[in-house]
Amino acid sequence: MMNEEVLCKRENLTIALQQVWGLCQDAQRYLEECPARTREACPDLSKTVERLVPSLLDSQAARLDTTSLSQLVSIVGSCRNCGLGATRNHTVPGEGVLNPRVMVIGEGPGADEDASGRPFVGKAGQYLDKWLAAVGLSRDRNVYIANIVKCRPPGNRDPLPEEAAACIPYLKRQIQLVKPEAILCVGRIAAHFLLQKEEGVGLLRGRFHRFEGIPVLVTYHPAGVLRNTGLRGAVWDDMQQLAGFLQLPIPARKG
Ligand code: SF4
């Protein structure tokens, strides 16, 4: 069910319950033969409404609690919980190995990913693979890669807050199932939605944050570094910091 349908149902239910409350008050006045008595204010009905028509995100999160990774991929494949479901070609749930040393999290699929259904396969993805390989990491052996939203925002715009909110229960369940040792969050937008931080990458990088107990390192998005090569040194420092944390051999600095 789409978000709007759930909201509409909840609004209609609230109105119907308020009307029932009013009718009960009228019936009581009539039975007590006390027409002058004023109606009591309607109590807070939000808990009753929530019980009868759970909000989409709550019901979705509860439904995902017991899903396996393959079930999750299947649910994502038919998801229309936000507007991005209408414009995508393929969902991009993520790929890699379970129990990885690192889970890379970006903001969302681009055109190449939308066309293939695989995360980080365009130029930026190939560049990311080089960063990972430099410290002995690869999506074939010890990395899992996913995004905040599983469908491409049109024109590669940033995901909207409501799109991220609709999709992030999938990512949370993925993280629970994939069980990474650490998370590498690439780019300001991914960091904003994952960590609920407003600061830019420049202020967030260089130290470990936490997401549900898992250490998170923030670095620049590979697409941004391709545009601004002046950021390469910072990314290299971040990859070395990650390698140090994971006790991976740290290679000598490249130019
Ligand atoms: S972006 Fe996420 S919530 Fe939105 S339609 Fe795609 S899978 Fe569903």
Image (cartoon, rainbow, N blue to C red):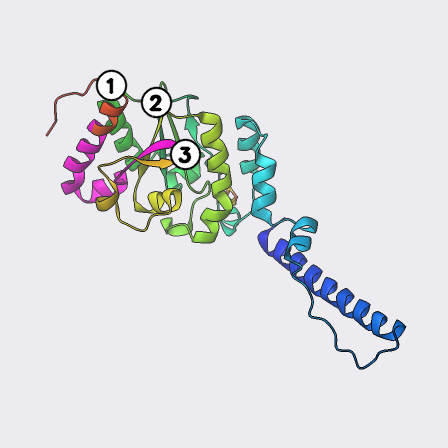
Q: Please give the range of residues in magenta.
A: 213-240
Task: Say the numbered circle drawn on residue 101.
Answer: 2
As measured in the structure, the alpha-carbon distance from the residue carrying label 3 to the one carrying label 1 is 22 Å
Horizontal side of 155 relative to 177 (left or right) equals: left
Which residue lies most toward the left here? 255
Majority secondary structure of magenta residues: helix
Residue that appears at 56% across and 42% down? 79
As measured in the structure, the alpha-carbon distance from the residue carrying label 2 to the one carrying label 3 is 14 Å
Horizontal side of 90 relative to 204 (left or right) equals: right
Which residue is more in the foreground, 116 or 74?
A: 74
Earlier residue among tags 2 and 1: 2
Which quarter of the figure has residue 247?
top left
Label 3, residues with CA under 10 Å away: few <14, some 14-19, many ≥20: many
Label 1, residues with CA under 10 Å away: few <14, some 14-19, many ≥20: some
Earlier residue among tags 3 and 1: 3
Q: State the image coordinates of residue 127 (x, y, percent, origin top left).
A: 26, 32
Q: State the image coordinates of residue 61 (x, y, percent, origin top left).
A: 56, 40
Horizontal side of 37 relative to 45 (left or right) equals: right
> Disc 2, disc 1: CB below 8 Å?
yes
Task: Say the numbered circle drawn on residue 248.
Answer: 1
Which residue is more in the foreground, 110 or 49?
A: 49
As measured in the structure, the alpha-carbon distance from the residue carrying label 2 to the one carrying label 1 is 10 Å
Residue that appears at 61% across and 57% down? 7
Q: Amino acid at mark 1?
A: Leu
Which quarter of the figure has residue 216?
top left
> Disc 2, disc 3: CB below 8 Å?
no
Residue that appears at 68% across and 62% down? 14
Q: Amino acid at mark 3?
A: Ala
What secondary structure is marked by label 2? loop
Tell me if the residue at label 2 has its CB under 8 Å from ligand 1: no
